[in-house]
Amino acid sequence: MAVLITGGSGFVGINIIEKLLDENLNVVNYATFPVPEEAEISFERRQGTYQFMEGDVLDATSLDDVMEKYDISMVIHGAVITPDFKQEKANSKHITNVNYMGTIEVLEAARRHQVKKFIYISSVSVYGDAAFEDEVLHETQSVPIPRTLYEITKYAAESTALRYKTLFGMEVMVTRVGQVFGPWERYTGIRHTPSGPFQATRNALLNREIKMPRPGVRDWVYSRDVAEVIWRLLQKHTYQYDIYNIGPGHQWTIEQWCDLLQQEIPNLTYSVAAQEDMNIDFFVPVDAGMLAIERLNEDLDFQPQYSMEEAFKDYMEWIATTSDFWLSEST
């Protein structure tokens, strides 16, 4: 038996795959493009087995084939398009189809093949405008007000996944991942606005002055912590909740991250002021509230392992031991 992850070639997916392989699981990555060669090498050094199958989440036949061929017992559904405004306007129908109807197809395939567990990777973005009204975002107390197609389709997809749980007795959980960053983040053409820490680190290593509109305070969550939560959900047998926020439980700024970068790159300069040639895009005009993570503590006995400083150290070690493929803007 194996775990199927859709969209596993994105950077969060790669972190999850690494964790599952470390736990000696068999993992099948169903995605429209393969992982970088460097990630393949990383997978080979780990305990479990890894398989890649190229496929579209809208292709029911292909989904059936992969579930039957690899005897899939658990599904992590992460395939999604995360567009900026320009892409949202240009590809509205396709984005909606992949993000929502793609989820339906994966749910249907999981139901047909009697998959034991289904984890839907949602996003803090589902809170929409509520994220700028509530200081702390709770899974039930904060009422989502999605506005963009990404936010709307993610909220609709997670609600539908939970409805399948009620209708068909499927074991379904939803995780709302916060502002995530970490190893393997890169430009793919699927996620159009990368994280603040990625943008700052990339500019620093390209010897560019970092120019940001504001300090950029968020509860930035490290991708390895996200992977740990997904693993714990996979192995747990009983759950108190259907929805879990995944965040670090604390906030810090990109300005603070730049201070750490300066210690590594002494000639680095950065500025915090609105300018025409800014090279840090926070995607939203104001900073959002912080995710409540009491459910992770209570139900999974999980405490985030990576503070800003610990994440920075691990991220720099990853950069030092891999090639500079992630610096490219080509997809």
Image: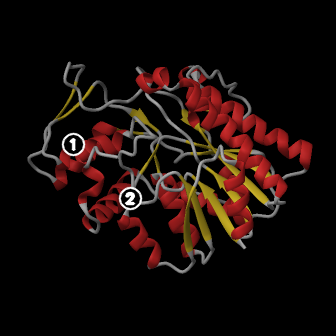
Residue 149 visible:
yes
Residue drawn 39% across the image and 46% down it? 188
Q: Residue furthest left?
A: 267
Residue 102 located left or right of residue 150: right
Q: Is residue 164 above or below residue 276?
A: below
Q: How many marks?
A: 2
Per the image, the residue denoted by label 2 is 310
Residue 136 visible:
no
Q: Which quadrant of the figure has residue 29? A: bottom right
Q: Residues within 10 Å of mark 2 (few under 14, many from 20)?
A: few
Quadrant position of the N terminus in the picture: bottom right
Report the amino acid beneath label 1.
Asn
Camera-side residue of 127 and 194: 194
- Label 1: which secondary element: helix
Residue drawn 82% across the image and 60% down it? 113
Q: Residues within 10 Å of mark 1 (few under 14, many from 20)?
A: some
Report the amino acid beneath label 2.
Glu
Task: Give the foreground label among 2 and 1.
Answer: 1
Per the image, the residue denoted by label 1 is 203
Residue 160 located left or right of residue 278: right
- Label 2: which secondary element: helix
Residue 166 in the image: state x and y as whole percent: 89, 43
Disc nearer the start of the sequence (2/1) = 1
Which dot marks residue 148? none
Residue 123 in the image: state x and y as whole percent: 59, 39
Residue 42 located left or right of residue 168: left
